[in-house]
Image (cartoon, helix red, strand yellow):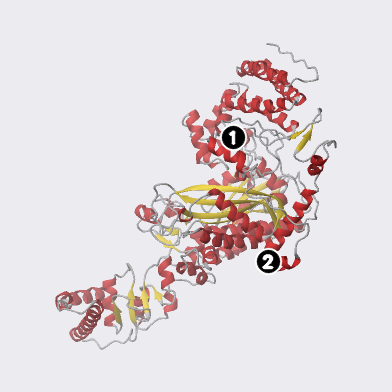
Amino acid sequence: MNNKEEEQDVTASFNRNEPDIASSSSVGYSGYGEYFHNKELQQLESDVQFRQKYQKEHRVSNPTLFQGCTIYVNGRTNPTRFQLHKLIILHGGTFKHYLSGKTAVTHILATELNASKKSSFANFKVVSPEWVTESIARGKLLPWQDFRIVQVSRLQGKITDFATVRNCMDPNFINAFFKSSRLHHLSNWKFQLRDNFVKEFILSYNDTIPDQKYVYFHIDFDCFFAQVSAKIDGKYDIHATPIAISHGINNSDISSCNYVARSFGVYNGMWVSSALKLCPDLKILDYEFDEYEAISNLFYSALKDIGIFKMVLPISIDEAIGCMLITPDITSELLTQKCMQVRNAVYNVTQGYSVSVGCGPSVLLARLALRKGKPNGFHISWFDTVTECHAFIDHFKLKDLPGIGYSTDLKIKEQFGNVQNISDLRDLLERPSNVSKLIKVIGSKNTKKLQIYLDGKDDDESISMVKDPHTYFQKKSLSVEINYAIRFKTIDDVDIFLERLALHLWEKLRDSNLMTRQITLKLMKRAQGAPVDPPKFMGMGKCDALSKVSNLGTNTQKFGTIASECKTLFRILSVPPEEVRGIGIQFHRLTDSNQKVGQKSEQREITTDLFRKRDHPDDDITNEPSKVAEPHTPVNPTYTSPVKNYWDRHLKRSITPFQYDFPDQLDPEFMSNLPKDVQEEITSHHKVVKKANRSLRTKLYDDPRKQIKQTQDLHFIHDGRLVPQLSFQGLSSAKQISETLIDWVDATVEDGPHEKDLELFTSYLDKLAEQGRCHIILHLIKTIKNRVDDHYNANHEGLEQWEYFLIRRLIPILNKAKPDVKFNLVFDL
């Protein structure tokens, strides 16, 4: 009799002889404890009777294979729980129908476990059902370790700690959260990769010539997390079984899934419950963070040791760009050999993991070639003519281009109709009028980027990554965010948590020998009408995003200053503590703490976008300076309420919460009793106050006869008055404002300027007129007039509106200033 026939015979026999426990339990009990205790005794007695009867009928001796083993079955299994029950008791084991305590069983049978079960069963012998069937087939009890379903890694034991730490006020909460956070690990890995590259670049790539030309190899793992976790698990074929990676079930999100799962409609970011509806056979595997890191290190080692790349640029833990010098003998056949060489090297070094490769003469073409090479393959985009290059690019969708996301794609389709691919866009942009419309829809920067992409070339960001990788990969910001299990009751809870979170980020700042001069506090506030308890346990739910920026005015690495600023920003945002669902801190404008005092750091390019918010750090452009001047797009300015304008104008700028006078000398005994951070802050403040008391402005008030040419915030003008410095959209230099005006005219020459934009500009000129700065007004008007004249021969419709604006609105402002100088403007209308 084979195993299958034996199982069927056992099941039939058991069904005939199983007693009716429900009917025998009708006797009254004093409580649930006594009821379940008696029920368990009846079940054990029934098992013994069934074993004895089966042995007598089939003349089988008393087996002892599972003697001493008490086994519990968790979840759905194959064989079923019912079949396993019979096999266990027939071979001398004890079957548990429910867990009454941690020491009640010796083994647990399961096919797979979610993250919470892995945590609660961490100290159990959890094995697959094959341990039972294989042991019976071989006639001996096999080692349970060979059938364990939870592969314990070096990091896994620490990761599961977060399952028991769900209170954000627990001192261990932040560390436990980040040990289990996928995004935190990815961010740290990317941070380390780029930091290591910068260090190696100084030592190994210092002979790189900026004008060198390369062939680019874009190398990427296929569904990296799923591929590694599946190999560690060992039970599933990544090419045949649908696999997804997630921390748990139902409301947990999927971070990675293989191509088999994607064929059912599963995608990254989808909830597990939704994915299981599309693919009921989807296997959910847990993260293996230490293995991911180990494979990534082997991956980069293989690329560096292969010997064909001048540089290896780190994109992420599983993605890189290899730069090979262009030589006269390069052909498509040679590049094919190199792609195969790269794939084989990675496969051998990582012991069985596959990558896909895209190759091309630009980073863009290599990226698009990678899309055609996936999965588990390669593609070469090397062309002899421009026509061949355009034909290759044209069949891709707009969203396949880097930096062109869903929102940009939607705006283009709303303006021009159904633009399916790049070929449709190329046809549209052949008409100059459509280029102007596109600028208005997506902005001049994105328009310029698309025009560059149409020729298969790289944008400025990709060029700077290759030409100046040392600067590109340097740290530009540090951030930390927690959007899970955030539940505060009082403002004191918020202050304590902010201190801990700021300390976590400050340690990174200190370890990197950096200082910051700008701090951003980000909050996720429960949206109006959203449930207090969201669908995902302790999750964020539907929220409104809020943020506030603090410009410190000087570089700092002092924890006391940083923590105090974070608390202040929270109070400015005025969010009730019980409404907070997520919180984050970000440091901007990082500088080297070893930099000498007085040494000027590199100045980042200041964008001259006319109507952009200057005080919002998320809008800062930190890319390398563009070589080609870009037209800037005037957009409708955002007008806030009068109440907000009042607070912006008075509370932030002119009203000081309270004033106090510092003594000339600080009391040493008093200072010694203060915490070190407070001492440093008071000492720093005291120095500033003393310096302010001796400042140039104070001396001016004491001696009005003293003439000053210029100070930081005040300008001395021709009639002897000292007036505040004026700025337009964050720009105070007349040269910068003139460049902005030129871009403004270029971008609106067809349809004319917008009325609200004109109001902003005339308001600025009125302020100049009140101060009698006619020479600046005259310079700006001439700038606009000369630029309008440059476009006069093109016969644009917007020229008439510009000329009307100059004559009817700008010239009267100039006359109102009562200039002492003569001027003459001639208009050829």
Q: Residues within 10 Å of mark 2 (few under 14, many from 20)?
A: few
- Name above or below for residue 436 compared with residue 380: above
Most distant residue in the bottom direction: 61
Rendered location of residue 598, percent (x, y) = 81, 51
The percent coordinates of residue 500 (x first, y second) are 58, 63
Which image quadrant: the N terminus? bottom left
How far apart marks 2 and 1 lie (CA) works out to: 69 Å
Amino acid type at circle 1 is His
Residue wearing tag 1: 390
Q: Is residue 807 above or below residue 51?
A: above
Residue at figure coordinates x 67%, y 18% from the top left: 806
Mark 1: few, some, or many residues within 10 Å (few <14, many ≥20)? some
- State the count of labels: 2
Tell me residue 571's x, y (percent): 55, 52
Q: Which mark is residue 674?
A: 2
Whether residue 790 can be seen here: yes
**Image point (57%, 42%), residue name:** 403
Q: Is residue 340 visible?
A: no
For the residue marked with disc 2, what is the amino acid? Leu
For this rendering, which residue is in front, 256 or 781? 781
Q: Earlier in the sequence, mark 2 or mark 1?
A: 1
518 horizontally vs 577: left or right: right
Give the farthest residue toward the top: 829
- Residue 592 % position (x, y): 74, 56
Image quarter of the C terminus: top right
Q: Is residue 206 depicted above or below 15 in this figure?
A: above
- Position of 470 with respect to 254 (left or right) is right
Quarter of the rendering containing residue 344 = bottom right
